[in-house]
Amino acid sequence: MLKWAIILAVVALIAGALGFTGIAGAAAGVAKILFFIFLIGVVIMLVLGATVFKAVAK
């Protein structure tokens, strides 16, 4: 998911540099959403790793 967010951010930068503001805005919006979903997933995995999975491993 992070890979797609980075790809869309690069597409947004290139489209913005070439003057395609509509495409750049849409790509940047999707990249932002994917990045925040990635961050939420990382936080959930960290919490689970510190609590649930530690208890199961014992």
Image: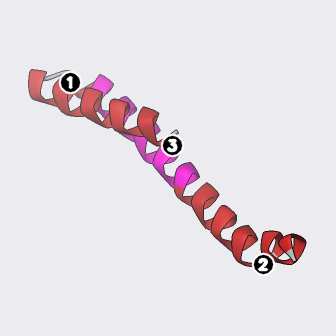
Specify few, some or many for label 1: CA neighbours under 10 Å numbering under 14, 14-19, or 20 or more: some
State which region is magenta: 23-38
Q: Position of residue 12 (x, y in %)?
A: 27, 31
The amino acid type, in three-letter code, at marker 3 is: Leu
12 is within the stretch colored magenta = no
Identify the residue at image location x=20%, y=21%.
Answer: 20
- 10 Å neighbourhood of mark 3: few (<14), some, or many (≥20)? some
Question: Which residue is depicted at the point 84% across and 71% down?
Answer: 57
Q: CA distance from mark 1 to mark 3?
A: 19 Å
Q: Tell which circle, 2 or 3, labels the residue nearer the N-terminal end.
A: 3
Residue of label 1: 15
Q: CA distance from mark 2 to mark 3?
A: 26 Å
Looking at the image, residue 15 lies above or below residue 53: above
Q: Residue at x 67, y 62 (%)?
A: 45
Quadrant of res 48? bottom right
Under circle 3, the secondary element is helix
Q: Which residue is mark 3?
A: 34
Which numbered circle lies on residue 51? 2
- Taking the spot 20% from the left edge, 24% from the top edge, the residue there is 15
Is the stretch drawn in magenta largely helix, strand or loop?
Answer: helix
Q: Is residue 25 above or below residue 41?
A: above
Q: Are marks 2 and 1 in contact (CB under 8 Å)?
A: no
Is label 1 in a helix, a strand or a loop? Answer: helix
Residue 24 image position (x, y, % from top left): 28, 30
Rendered image coloring scheme: secondary structure
Q: CA distance from mark 2 to mark 1?
A: 44 Å
Question: Which percent across, then down, holds residue 22?
Answer: 30, 26
Q: Secondary structure at mark 2?
A: loop
Q: How many marks?
A: 3
Residue 24 counted in the magenta span: yes
